[in-house]
Amino acid sequence: MSGPTYLQTMVQWLRAPALLSTGIAVLASGLLYFKQNDVIYPRNIPENARTEVPKPHQFKIEHSEELSLRTPDEVNLHAFLIRPNAQHARNITIISFHGNAGNIGHRLPIAKVLSEDLGCNVLFVEYRGYGYSSGEPNEKGLGIDAQTALDYVRNRKDLRDTKIIIYGQSLGGAVAIGLVGKNQSQGDIAGLILENTFMSIRTLIPSVLPPAKYLTLLCHQLWPSNDVIPTIKKVPILFLSGLQDEIVPASHMKGLYDACVAEKKIWKAFPEGSHNDTIAEPGYFDAIEDFIVNEVLDEGEKSKSAL
Ligand SMILES: *[C@@H]1O[C@H](CO)[C@@H](O)[C@H](O)[C@H]1NC(C)=O
Ligand SMILES: *[C@@H]1O[C@H](CO)[C@@H](O)[C@H](O)[C@H]1NC(C)=O
Ligand SMILES: CC(=O)N[C@H]1CO[C@H](CO)[C@@H](O)[C@@H]1O
């Protein structure tokens, strides 16, 4: 793997800011209804997250394009498309939805491994209000952003005949589940990968902070993944769960797994993985590669190994 050093650096960064956990405390301490978008979408953490988005060349990523995707409601989404070397390329495009802080540049080490080591095209999209994207984040808007990213891949000549995998970490898992739930009927979404995501925001609040239980009704950003996941039938799903997750208890991933009735569902737990660093646990990318080879590619495509 070419990416471990970058991944370690990325994990160091992810450890620094206080993310959802402090967010929940703020939520509970009364700022509640009007401030919850700032809490659930801390797009200004770290401090320079809206002004400095690291570029692919800083991670020695060779093939990349910087894109601006226009949504139907006229928001400009900043995105990177990372391509594998032609001789290693697989017939796959991964659309990645990020967690709730930072920007896509901070997560480029992940794209590097997925493209260079696993041979996939990778589209990293920055939600509205994050990084260089315009607009303000909210549940409805992020749903439009996700749809815009998928439609972009579906309409782009050199990507539209690839198999699409939707990959979401933490908040991005909820975005990914919502998108696949709405768009599975066309049959071009070949896989869904979820990492350390929650069953819903309302169920997350009491498990993180029991006294806040009664506050959950004031929560207007719902992200009801537990209701949507049972509607996904034909798309294979990989669940990557860090059992030491201190922000989203691992019981949420297990709950989603249990609620899942997809024809293929794969469970992969990382006993030492916490919310931020499961990505750097041994076997993480192997699990993704196994999923791609066993559940996503057609028989004829399997022999063309990317490695
Ligand atoms: C992950 O990030 C959270 C929030 O910033 C922090 O509280 C926690 O200590 C981090 N976890 C690890 C294992 O570094
Ligand atoms: C890539 O996958 C698509 C969608 O399954 C399929 O139609 C196409 O034939 C595949 N292309 C190659 C070169 O294997
Ligand atoms: C093919 C398909 O199912 N597309 C749908 C994806 O979801 C959007 C938003 O709900 C619909 O407008 C599309 O028809």
Image (tube, rainbow, N blue to C red):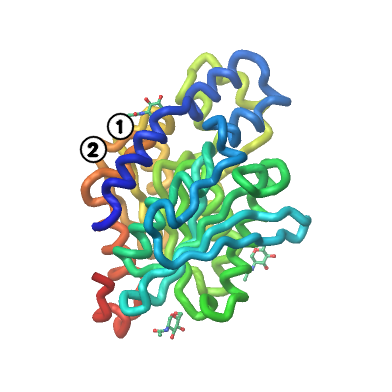
Above/below status of 81 relative to 158: above
Q: Is residue 73 left or right of residue 145?
A: right
The percent position of residue 210, horizontal first and vertical second, equals 48, 18
Q: Is residue 113 left or right of residue 181?
A: left
Along the viewing direction, whichever of 183 and 262 lies nearer the viewer:
183
Q: Badge 2: few (under 14), some or many (20 or more) residues near its Cα, within 10 Å?
A: few
Q: Badge 1: few (under 14), some or many (20 or more) residues near its Cα, within 10 Å?
A: some
The percent position of residue 32, horizontal first and vertical second, equals 67, 21
Q: Write down the quadrant of residue 254 in the picture.
A: top left
Residue 90 visible to the viewer: yes
* For marks 2 and 1 on the same chain, the one whose residue lies earlier in the sequence: 1
Residue 190 visible to the viewer: no
**Which residue is rendered at x = 65% and y = 60% of the image?**
68
Residue named by callout 2: 271
Residue extending farthest right:
73
State the mark number for residue 244.
1
Asked whether disc 2 touches disc 1, contact meaning CB atoms under 8 Å apart, the reply is yes
**Which residue is rendered at x = 48% and y = 65% of the image?**
64
The percent position of residue 60, horizontal first and vertical second, equals 37, 57
The percent position of residue 96, horizontal first and vertical second, equals 48, 56
What quarter of the picture does the N terminus occupy? bottom left
**Which residue is rendered at x = 70% and y = 55% of the image?**
76
Q: Amino acid at mark 1?
A: Gln
Mark 1 Cβ inside 8 Å of ligand 1: yes
